[in-house]
Amino acid sequence: MLLEWKTKRFETLSSLELYELLKLRSEVFVVEQNCVYLDIDGKDEKALHLLGTFEGKIVEYARLFKPNDYFAEASIGRVVTHPDFRDRKIGHILMREAVESIRIYFGESKITISAQLYLKKFYESHGFIQTSEMYLEDDIPHIEMKRS
């Protein structure tokens, strides 16, 4: 499966790209996870948006932050794979692209994330280690994880 990758600043997203990425985030983080929260949190304008597309459709997405825009270190958030594509294990490609994009765009290798607890092993496979106790974020168990 060949994905096309784009990294875009908020102001360069097309209206269709913005609509698709917000729809995907809402589909997964609000509807699928049954979590009522404000996904549009005012941080999209600061982020770089990593889009993985297949046949023109966004199937992978993450927000990338430079140091001090979310955590003291660079950060990756809103990591999501379209439900129809999860069986292809492309989330690993997304994480490799996200880490590499942080290096390219921000010149950083230290990354902090707020990870859903059930994805701990997934993030560990990408070099992240747990650095906090479990905490609830929007009633979902999370942990802080760091990568050096």
Image: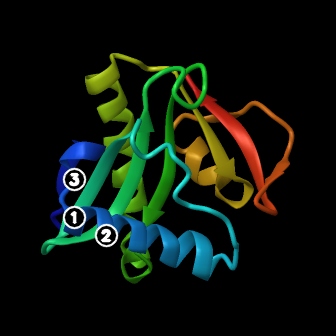
Separation of disc 1 and disc 2 at Cα?
A: 6 Å
> In the rendered view, does 133 fall on the left or right side of 129?
right
SS at circle 3: loop
SS at circle 2: helix
Residue 89 placed where, x, y %?
40, 66
Q: Are marks 3 and 1 in contact (CB under 8 Å)?
A: yes
Vertical side of 11 occupied by 84: above or below: below
Q: State the residue position of label 2.
A: 19
Q: State the residue position of label 1.
A: 15
Nearer to me, 63 or 36: 36
Q: State the residue position of label 3.
A: 13
> In the rendered view, does 15 fall on the left or right side of 21?
left
Separation of disc 2 and disc 3 at Cα?
A: 10 Å
> In the rendered view, does 3 fall on the left or right side of 74?
left
Q: Are marks 1 and 2 in contact (CB under 8 Å)?
A: yes
Residue 74 placed where, x, y %?
49, 26
Q: Which mark is residue 84?
A: none
Vertical side of 20 occupied by 120: above or below: above
Image quarter where the N terminus lies is: bottom left
Q: Amino acid at mark 3?
A: Leu
| Residue in the image at 86% along x and 39% along y | 133
SS at circle 1: helix
Query: Tag 1: Cα neighbours inside 10 Å, few (<14), some, or many (≥20)?
Result: few
Residue 128 placed where, x, y %?
59, 35
Disc nearer the start of the sequence (2/3): 3
Q: Are marks 2 and 3 in contact (CB under 8 Å)?
A: no
